[in-house]
Amino acid sequence: MKLLTHNMMKSHCKGVVNGFPLKLSSTQVELKEVEFNADFITRMLERLEWGALVDAAGQLGVADGLPEMAPSSGKEEEDEEDVLRKIHHVLLEVEITEGELECPETGRKFPIKNGIPDMRLNEDE
Amino acid sequence: MASKVNQKKQHRNIMKCLKHLADIVGHTCTPSTLPTPVVLLGNAGHANSIGASDVRELVGGSFPSSYRLYFPPNKQFSLLFTPQPVPTLVGDINLQKIKEVTLYCCYVTEHVTMETVAASLRPPGLHIHPDVVTVEQEQQMIQFFLDSAAGTTQEDLKHRKTLHYGYQFNYKTNSVDLDSPLSEGFPECVRDVMEGIRKLINIDPDQCTVNIYQPGQGIPKHVDTHSIFTQEILSLSLGSGVVMEFRHPISGTVVPVHLPARSLTVMSGESRYLWQHGITPRKQDVSEEGDVISRGIRVSLTLRQCTTEPCRCEYPSQCDSQNYGKPRFSVASDADAAKIEGEFVSDVYEEIADHFSHTRHSPWPGVVDFLNSLPSRSLVLDVGCGNGKYLGVREDVLVIGNDNSANLLSICRERGHETFACNALSLPVRGGLCDGGICIAMLHHLSTRDRRIRCLGNLASLLRPGGRCLVTVWAQEQHLDDGEVGRREFAAQDVFVDWQKKQNAAEAELFYRYYHVFREGELEDLVREVKGVEVERVTYEKANWCCVFRRT
């Protein structure tokens, strides 16, 4: 599971008011090389919940170099590409292969196995 | 050196053939160094395109009429049965070539006869009684029926003429109307035959169908309706023998069986209730002995006993009384719906994942076109992504997949794709993040209108304003777009479609998947129930309704 995916996901347990973000714990993390494209990262910036991304990255020890606030597009910065590359790395190249997601309200745990988070609920949930 | 290699090859080939033979006769078969009356001819089988005349030519001299050849269907060997062991036979033909193929021959130790091999291959419950009528009776009956049929009109010269006694057989319903017996009873010649075969049969026939087959005519493979005809089906062949083919409906195995003239064929048990039988429309047959025989005019007398009792056989997949083994669709609540979708969608896909994935490898042009119409660097969700065949279509678009089947998602993972598992009725995703969405051949697995609308609503929520989604579902009407005459339709909108998972060559397991197939206009009606989206276009492609909608 990539951190981009984690940032998109929220809990869908019954009765949950705000299921975002899902608490993240990992027992196995892999790095996977993905081709960098500045346009894609720029397009994604406004869709991300930045605080949750920084927290999750921090948990995995990959937050170094991530700005505290989301970079705003249109601003020309000298090291803009470096920042985008860093964000690209965090969003797409870090994969949690074994771990767990937890609903922040109900505590219901969703396993991550073989890189795939299992969000399936039972009938009564 | 060369002969050592040949010896190894020969040994391997012979042992393989003997293994197949053992499977047929049900006991081990071993090569014999001493001559026996049974000779195995490896590589001289039907599957090698070799026939009886080829073998006879090789054996040469004057091939004695007491020698009998047998070609098991679709196998790479044949068997030669001699009345006494012939010590020179194997030495003469071993390592000889027929049509560029080298024969590997040996004597078989075990006492295998042609009759036991042929009988072992036949579907269980099939019995053939030879010579149950005399030649005079045969001639008389042929004349009688040809005369009776001469008066009747025939719509299509391609089809055989038929006559009915006792009850009229209705080919549209494949049944009879027990409330309308025919006034004519059985003709005297038929009653005489029944008297003669009384000891061979277990039924008291009250329905008789006579078929007159000209050479080149046949009858498509079918199982006689279970509910209306009880126990055995009897068939008397007059005028000419024929090779009838029996097909196992699940494994697909086809066994040809020769029905000689004047023989009575009794189909009972599996051969009546499970295996299909039919006659291929052609003018010649290949006998079990491997000879080509031309067909003459054949008159068949089918005798059956009617019943009002529903059928309780052990072969529900072919049984109309048992709804062909299919579940009956009934949904009274959302809980029922979830149960059906669990048992007949989710569970089935988990079981068949690998096999299913093998059959789903080519991306549809229509879906690829849609994905190509999205802006570069888009984020897309594929809801119900299956084996992930659409996840990597565009290098410049990230498509994240989700599916309810962990096994299918494993396949996506192996291919390097990003996925998560969930049920489409509840997507654990923040709204408004996606440039596009696709939902290919998934919505039709939801069993109520309400649930289908909910799913569409979930798809809509994924999209940013301006984001677009493609949904495809199976159509009730098939073949609307290829101009084919005689359109096919699913009989109802809520159907169970079978899937055969072949475990090995002999056995297959049957699964049923639930589908709600869509009428024209139905999909867009559902989309219109969803707030905040508008229909962009609706098309029919390859028996699927496709709808693109946009978030406004």
Image (cartoon, rainbow, N blue to C red):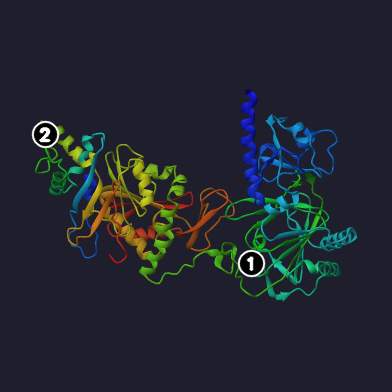
Label 2 resides on the chain identified as A
Residue B529 appears in the picture as rendered: no
Q: Is residue A125 left or right of residue B182?
A: left
Residue farthest to the front?
B34
Residue farthest to the top?
B1
Q: Badge 2 is on which residue?
A: A76
Residues at marks 1 and 2, CA–CA distance in whole angstroms: 80 Å
Residue B264 image position (x, y, % from top left) = 78, 60
Residue B170, image quadrant: bottom right
Q: Residue drawn at (24%, 64%), measured in percent from left and top? A: A14
Q: Residues within 10 Å of mark 2 (few under 14, many from 20)?
A: few
In the rendered view, would you say B242 is above or below A72? below
Residue B71 appears in the picture as rendered: yes
Label 1 resides on the chain identified as B
In the rendered view, would you say B43 is above or below A20? above
Q: Is residue A91 left or right of residue B416?
A: left
Q: Badge 1 is on which residue?
A: B226
Q: Secondary structure at mark 2?
A: loop
Query: Which amino acid lies under the numbered mark 2 shown in the image of this protein?
Result: Glu
Q: Nearer the viewer, residue B169 or B358?
A: B358
Q: Is residue B138 left or right of residue B420?
A: right
Q: Residues within 10 Å of mark 1 (few under 14, many from 20)?
A: many
Q: Quadrant of the N terminus of chain B?
A: top right
In the rendered view, would you say B222 is above or below B419? below
Q: Secondary structure at mark 1?
A: loop
Tag of residue A68: none
